[in-house]
Amino acid sequence: MSVTRTNPALALVTLLAAWSTPGCSDTGSCPVECPEGEVCCEVAECAGQCINDCRHTTSPCPAGMPTCNLDTGRCMPPVGSDAGSVPPGQDAGSLPPGPDAGSGGDCAVLGCPIDKVCCAAPNACAGRCIVDCRLGAACPAQLPVCDQATGVCVSQTTAGVRSQQFTVRNPGSDVDWWVKAIYPNDGPHGGRYPAVVSVPGGVGAGSAMESVPDSNRNPAEQAKRGFVVVIFDADGRGNTQGVEDQGGHVHQDGLKAVIEAVAALPYVDASRIGLNTSSFGITMGSGVLARYPTLPVRFLVDYEGPANRKDTGRCDEFGTGHITHDCADDLWWSEREAESFIKRVQVPYLRIQNTTDHAQPDNTHCILMINSATAAQYGGGGVAPWTRVNLATMNQPNRTYATAAPPAYNPTGASIDLTALWSELLAAP
């Protein structure tokens, strides 16, 4: 390896030098000390992030950046090269994370440690091991999306999507459901992605979700971030014939069939499937997981779902809900109260709750749901291995609450990135 002293003009290309890890500020001032074997980047492209120190023999410079700067610990182009140049074949606007420490040789042949992935050509880090962003490493601002198939950070603007429309027979009604999977555009060519099945709120059709303008809820926008997003129309809704079941056993049986069909899709990683419900969709979602605990589902996300007939059937003084059924018909309601089902759900449960609920006069139903899901060892009434309300910065996991001591609620109107939550839940052991 050749060595030279500092040439300030070459600092512009330091992003090519190394894969960055969290640890510094995002201001470029780097007040926090980086781990041993790393240095803090102070240029715009990777400002405030720890990058590998090439002065360590375990972190050799790549062929396109062969010179190690002994003052900075960063790799540089050969002496005399153009400071603003990019290795041939590289697009400066879509450069991947650089090489990670500890790699050497061709990782396609030698393999990578369990927490790293092999960077492929034509990327500048080709043949070297880089940090797997699916394990929680933050992606840099210019490459903000963690590709869930490869573990490499990518530009959101480069991510395209495709879709597949098909039908799934509901064994509970013998009706064919309309189903659509929206997935990253390289899915059919061997890439397998985590999938999330979205259950719509109320008696809504999943097909209507395609026109939602909110990028955090639109399935195509969600798929661009590295997920297969599956929407469906249940019996009596949208493009599906049949009779409306109000989220009961018939609808739950259909959802089970959809989840099983999704697991068999060639572009889905069947070991990483989640369920995301909105409002009344929690009735169908919690019901299917309670009744069929062996389904290949890793987590349940619940956006402001109602707990019981008081919330959905106008069965108390507040008169909320869309269902007009006899409140005394316990047998009928036994198929349609999430409060009962959530106690039997055996996967991690995340509740999203705003300060002002979209349908209920207060948030007592949120407290009832989280307390019912949380395991007995944490003071709850359920069996879920993990529970939480809202973001990790707002509430601790596995907590129970009271009306007088509620969880921290999301400010009404503040957006929550669902795909970030899905990634967090999939990264959990």
Image (cartoon, helix red, strand yellow):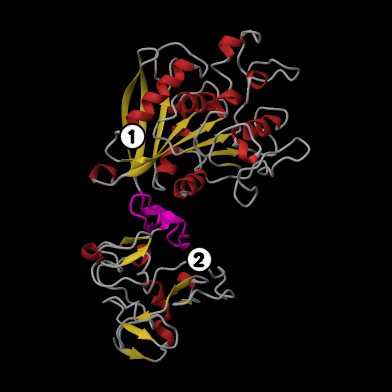
Looking at the image, residue 400 lies above or below residue 21? above
Query: Secondary structure of the magenta portion, mostly?
Result: loop
| Image coords of residue 232 (percent x, y) | 41, 26
* Contact between labelled residues 2 and 1, with CB atoms less than 8 Å apart: no
Q: Quadrant of residue 376?
A: top right
| Image coords of residue 53 (percent x, y) | 41, 79
Image quarter of the N terminus: bottom left
What residue sits right under mark 1 in the picture? 263
Mark 1 and mark 2: Cα distance apart in space: 34 Å
Question: Magenta region: which residues?
Answer: 133-159
Residue at screen point 46% across, 32% down: 198
- Dot 2 lies on which element? loop
Identify the amino acid type marked 2.
Pro
| Image coords of residue 186 (percent x, y) | 28, 46
| Number of numbered tags placed on the structure image | 2
Residue at screen point 35% across, 59% down: 114
Residue 96 makes an appearance in the image: no
Looking at the image, residue 129 lies above or below residue 38? above
**276 lies left or right of 173:** right
Residue at screen point 35% across, 84% down: 68
- Callout 1 crowding tier (Cα within 10 Å): few <14, some 14–19, many ≥20: many
- Callout 2 crowding tier (Cα within 10 Å): few <14, some 14–19, many ≥20: some
Residue 75 makes an appearance in the image: yes
| Image coords of residue 369 (percent x, y) | 63, 31
